[in-house]
Amino acid sequence: MKDFPSCFGENGVQVADFSSSNTNSNRAAQNMVTCVYQCRLRGKSCWITVTWSKNLMGQGLSVGIDDSTNQCLCKADIKPWLFSKRKGSKKLEADLCKIDIYWDLSSAKFRSGPEPLKGFYVGLVFEKQMILLLGDMRKEAFKKTGCIPAPLPFSAVLISKREQIFGKTVFSTRAQFCNIGQVHDLVIECDTSGVSDPCLLIRVDSKPVMQVKHLGWKFRGNHTILVDGLAVQVFWDVHNWLFAMSPGNAVFMFNSKVSSDNLWTSQPLYDPHTLHCSWSQTFQDSHSQNLGFSLILHAWKNE
């Protein structure tokens, strides 16, 4: 999969080809969910990248902070599968700013993916204010840290999420298309095995919102759907599902407030070996252009 096609214009979204070799090991390494949040520290814009990962050893968590020039200021790797690391705290130095990370994953509940569903918290504290709080154990987090919530202009806002999903003909996840919007069940259906004319169907909360027939001719494209009254532009590239010599993944991007004249050009959207400090610039640019929230899904077919 080289790039989204010229039908998106000269400034089409570019992606990297990493599925042609070592597919099984790549898929194992790619079982991760990465979220990028924007916040302000001492009047300067910063980006917080939170990555949940899963491998044979168990669950993993990484938190990094970039400045407005896309320089990685600091990073913390937490390995909560180690008993001593399932609950704890860590201090980070970021551009002369001290940030404390607190986490409790001792009672976290997971599905098949690396991101916990409930029974946990991860909090970032700056100058005795909680600038980012993840999880449902909010009361426990504030009690542990002894801090107060950061006021809205300084609290972190989710601007992008990148996730690996797996399935045979049905691929499902939960999606929130804006920072304070409702969480929806998102399902992608596509049967390409032994089907002469495959069809792509996308559902939101069980309701069909998009259908692509004659997928062999329309394996790449874009379409706009409405979710909660918000226009969400959907891009898809299923070339690897249909034509790759070895099993590969499809890519889906859901973007609210997309400007068709200003899509990403300089940074590949997915490379399993790319560190968050390099690719978060893509989403940083999207926010500065008021492109809203981006959800990127890499869909792998289970054999």
Image (spheres, grey):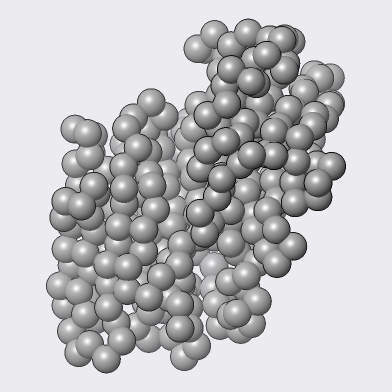
Residue 270, percent from left and from top: 54, 60
Q: Residue at x 68, y 14 (%)?
A: 143
Residue 221, percent from left and from top: 27, 64
Residue 303, percent from left and from top: 45, 83
Q: Residue at x 19, y 32 (%)?
A: 229
Quadrant in which residue 105 is drawn: top right
Q: Residue at x 68, y 53 (%)?
A: 59
Residue 95, percent from left and from top: 80, 24
User: Viewer-proximal residue, 145 or 204?
Assistant: 145
Residue 154 in sight from this viewpoint: yes
User: Viewer-proximal residue, 216 or 59?
Assistant: 59
Q: Is residue 200 above or below residue 172?
A: below
Residue reaching furthest to the front: 107
Q: Residue at x 37, y 44 (%)?
A: 175
**Left or right for 108, reference 296:** right
Quadrant in which residue 140 is drawn: top right
Residue 263 in sight from this viewpoint: no
**Left or right for 201, reference 82:** left
**Count the marks: how many?**
0
Quadrant in which residue 222 is drawn: bottom left
Q: Is residue 66 above or below residue 277?
A: above
